[in-house]
Amino acid sequence: MQGAKREVKEELGIFAENIKEILKVKVLFKYEGGQNNRFITLFEYSDNLRVNDFKIDKEEVDFIKYFKIEEIKSLINGREKFSSGFSEVFKAYCRVKGF
């Protein structure tokens, strides 16, 4: 948990004290030239922050934007490109949360 809090602080510039673990999932990541399994631990953080409240590390994060769950589902179903494995992790999150 301390590692997740540290990464949130480093990459997003916020203190995520009420962060909680939601799920762990094994995901097959495909990349040019191969593929491998990765184990992902997903955490959840809730607060009333505006996009401007974040101080992002430009080497780690391109930008921040809020989406509704249905918007993400629509993008995935419309074959929008996401990083390898994102769709699997997002679907697992929706199952756990009942979305």
Image: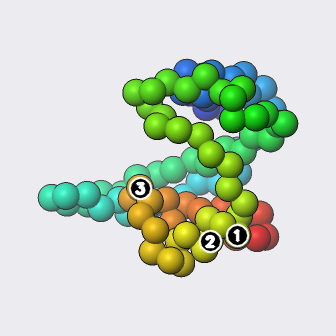
Residue 76, x across and y down, in percent: 53, 71
* Residue at screen point 62% across, 71% down: 73
Residue 15, x across and y down, in percent: 72, 22
Query: What element does badge 1 sit on?
Result: helix
Look at the image and tell me whether residue 19 can be seen.
no
Question: In this rendering, which labeled residue sits more in front, label 1 or label 3?
Answer: 1
* Residue at screen point 39% across, 59% down: 84
Q: Are marks 1 and 2 in contact (CB under 8 Å)?
A: yes
Q: Which residue is mark 2?
A: 73
Residue 32 numbered tag? none
* Residue at screen point 72% across, 60% down: 68
Residue 23, x across and y down, in percent: 65, 54
Q: Estimate the spatial distance between the alpha carbons at disc 1 and disc 3, rounded to whole Å.
A: 18 Å
Query: What element does badge 2 sit on?
Result: helix
Q: Does 98 appear above or below 11?
A: below
Residue 65, x across and y down, in percent: 62, 45
Q: Callout 2 environment at 10 Å: few (<14), some (14 to 19), or many (20+)?
A: some
Q: Does 96 appear above or below 65?
A: below
Which residue is situated farthest in the left direction here? 33
- Return the disc, 1 or 3, that comes first in the chain's sequence: 1
The amino acid at mark 3 is Ser
Q: Estimate the spatial distance between the alpha carbons at disc 1 and disc 2, rounded to whole Å.
A: 5 Å
- Residue 14 falls in image quadrant: top right
- Return the disc, 3 or 2, that comes first in the chain's sequence: 2
Q: Which residue is mark 3?
A: 83
- Horizontally, residue 84 falls left or right of residue 96, namely left
Q: Dividing the image into 4 quarters, which one contains the N terminus?
A: top right
* Residue at screen point 59% across, 54% down: 24
The amino acid at mark 1 is Glu
Q: Which residue is mark 1?
A: 70
Q: Colour scheme used in the picture?
A: rainbow
